[in-house]
Image (tube, helix red, strand yellow):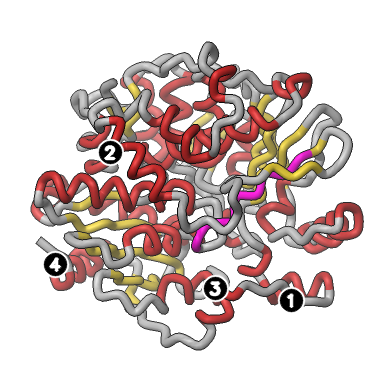
Amino acid sequence: MKFISTRGEGGRLSFLEAVAEGLAPDGGLFVPEQMPDISGRLKNWEGLGYAELCFEFLRLFADGVPDGELKKIVSESYKKFDDPAVAPLRGLGGCLWMLELYHGPTLAFKDFALQLLGNLYEYMLAKTSRKINVLGATSGDTGSAAISGLLGKKGVNIFILYPEGRISPLQERQMTCTGADNVFPIAIDGTFDDAQAIVKKIFGDNSFKAEWGLSAVNSINLARVLAQCVYYIYAWLKLPESAREKAVFAVPTGNFGNVLAGWMAWKCGMRCGGFRVATNQNDILFRLFNTGVYEVSEVMPSFAPSMDIQVASNFERFIYFSENGDSAKVRRIMSEFSKTGKWVFEGFDPGNFSASRMSDAEIPAKISEVWDKHGIVIDPHTACAFKDLPDSPAVVLSTASPAKFPELIKKTLGFEPKSDILEKLKREKIVKTSMPADAEKIRAFIRERGIR
């Protein structure tokens, strides 16, 4: 299996090479040269535990990693999850299910990929004696999950940019209270889109990237998307057979990586009823799937901060597959979009995607409704995915623990959800660096604190 850039000029890389690179040298994102067909394997995968299923799926892509080593990496990655099922599928009655993706060490779905990515990095560095500096941007959960996955790993320093004052206090504490020498949280004066643009600009400097061994943890890194494919397949296999091909996955969506993972599982042969792209009031994807116009507008702070995004990085992978691998067209679209903030898709066909949008006024009401109807507490991102569900079988992806948003839950339901992990963090000292949204200043900071 080889991996190529969506923009066609990044060469043909192995799985480990693509993971180490993160962003392709031509500015594109890595994709598999061809997608494997898993339709004939699904029956044999029924009854597998989560780590076993993850191994079986990833070995189709990571064929450069010996099976024994890959099994160890995968097994180690899910040991810190607090539910034996890792991703339990909860029936809510009728034809509705909820996939709980918040049982990892940082209580968010990002743990599924970033615990694995941390162990992949450790494996690669042990083999090559390399050192790397991991650079990423976060709108809330990616940073804490990446830091958890890389905490104390030898030969790795991690720099995470986040928008100061635009993530929840507990999300910030998860990044800034580790006490680890290899972790550098950077609070920038700007939005997540500003942080993400800085990361892409720095990765676009190929000489700096090579000099400092930069690698990515955002969902621009293909390993993250592939790891997230697994929980869709796991949930699909847990559904009644009669519901599988009709089931719609409703996915809280900001950067398009989570829902793209489901769509890639579908492209591999996991036949389902489609995907519901659930946005908050930062609704670029809602507007796209309803009008065919992909256009940036101003980022508005919301109750669901991890989705406060207007430039969905992973959408480039979707364009590549939708255009049948036409890299020249991808380059043209992304070039125009970077200049104007807009692209109109002529005759746009959303395929098996639909989309919903939820305002801040609606989120508390939906949290209250789900509590009254099902007796479960959901976080504000998951609330967005409960909007306008189809009558057909549906699986809502619950992407974060409600304990990460205690202020909103207490105001809405009258009580505060607790987590021992988060309660301990409240007593720790915050260590962060505040900086302007300036790529040159971030580059200088990496030179000062980076490892090589």
Based on the displayed image, in which of its 4 quarters is residue 59 positioned? top left
Q: Which SS class for mark 4?
A: helix
Mark 1 or 4: in front is 1
Q: Which SS class for mark 2?
A: helix
Residue sitting at 55 percent across and 28 percent down? Answer: 263
Residue that badge 1 annotates: 416
Residue that badge 3 annotates: 421
Q: Amino acid at mark 1?
A: Glu
Q: Amino acid at mark 3?
A: Ile
Percent across and percent down for residue 251 are 64, 41
Q: Earlier in the sequence, mark 3 or mark 2?
A: 2
Q: Relative to 34, say whether 148 is above or below.
A: below
Residue sitting at 21 percent across and 58 percent down? Answer: 133
Residue sitting at 83 percent across and 44 percent down? Answer: 92
Residue that badge 4 annotates: 447
Q: Which region is colored magenta?
A: 97-105
Percent across and percent down for residue 346 are 55, 20
Mark 3 or 2: in front is 2
Mark 3 or 4: in front is 3
Residue that badge 2 annotates: 69
Residue 325: in magenta span: no
Q: Earlier in the sequence, mark 1 or mark 3?
A: 1
Looking at the picture, tell me which residue is in the foreground, 323 or 333. Answer: 323
Mark 1 or 2: in front is 2
- Which numbered circle lies on residue 81? none
Looking at the picture, tell me which residue is in the foreground, 53 or 357. Answer: 53
**Rendered-image quadrant of the C terminus:** bottom left
Residue 308 in view in this figure: no
Marks 3 & 4, CB-CB < 8 Å contact: no
Q: Earlier in the sequence, mark 1 or mark 4?
A: 1
Marks 3 & 2, CB-CB < 8 Å contact: no
